[in-house]
Amino acid sequence: MSKLRGISSIAPVGGADAGEGDHQYIIFRWYHGLFFPSSSPSSCHGFWHNAALVVPSALFIAYLGFQAKRNIKKLGHGRSYVMIVYYVLLWFAAVLNLAWSSFQVWQCVPGKDVAWNLLSLSTASILLCLEISIVAFLLQDNYVSGLETLAHTFMVSGAIVGVDVFVKVICIFGLGVPLFIDVEITHRGKWFIWFTYRLVLSAVYAYILFVHYSKWRDKLPPKPAFYNYVIMLFIFNAIALCACGFAGIGAGFGLWLYNFSVVCYHSLYLPFLYVTFLADFFEEEDWLLDNAYYSEMKDAGFFDAEWD
């Protein structure tokens, strides 16, 4: 009975749309009861949902920590301002993402809504900054460049993220749209905003892919990592777009797909970014360093005996 009282305390009541709201709410609770069972009526998600967010985020930070000494040494030798900034941003985003994953319960605790919205807004902003700036950087001619490329890249991505933050702040704190509150599933304005957001991102990535397969493909960089990155983000945003559309009309599958896409994004995006982008830089440094050592040893005559 305690669970029923907890459920009824947040279930939509009254109004002309009460029947539709109850129907959507029942679907939402069925979905969470099936995949993310909760031991407390005050928690929005259950153990498996939180574990799917926290465990990958914690493992990724542990991996970064394990590789930190070697990577920092290579960054110091390479003296690439772009890579240094991206590495710092990656750490910052990973820590914020772990905090966001760990404090999921805040969205259902009375009095924590402001803190949860600020944490969610900060996490979403740093992830969007990385997502956009990586594309802007890979569109540059030089893979590892200096301050000019760095300034141009973050000027573009910073302006886009600034507009995104401004719009979300108005929607959340001005209009009261629960963008980051998962319990609020019947708010049509929430799904309209997320649908528009994913539609814009999907259109941008689709346009890049269109140019790649058109006669203007020479204008894009000939880097496989660039297209792998764009393809994966296009697929994700297209799935999230469909999920928001179905959720907006009250389809239970849309709610499931939306939550699943959020879990996948926060669990896998940062490791995917590291493997696609930064890991190549560090591996390339290893290869160059090995060649340098080999050249020095060859010049010193260490391999002369092999030819005798």
Image (cartoon, rainbow, N blue to C red):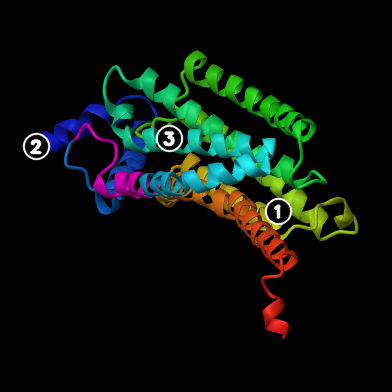
Circle 2 packing at 10 Å, graded few (<14), some (14-19), many (20+), is few
Where residue 170 sits: x, y (%)? 55, 17
Residue that mark 2 sits on: 1
Tell me which residue sits at (22%, 31%) in the image. Answer: 42
Where residue 255 sits: x, y (%)? 42, 46
Q: Are marks 2 and 1 in contact (CB under 8 Å)?
A: no
Q: Nearer the viewer, mark 3 or mark 1?
A: 3
Please provide the residue range marked out in magenta.
41-56
Left/right placement of residue 223 relative to residue 94 reads right
Residue that mark 3 sits on: 95
Left/right placement of residue 144 relative to residue 198 reads right
Check disc 2 and give the amino acid type: Met
Check disc 1 and give the amino acid type: Phe
Residue that mark 1 sits on: 226
Which element is circle 2 on?
A: loop
Check disc 3 and give the amino acid type: Val
135 or 290: nearer the eye? 290
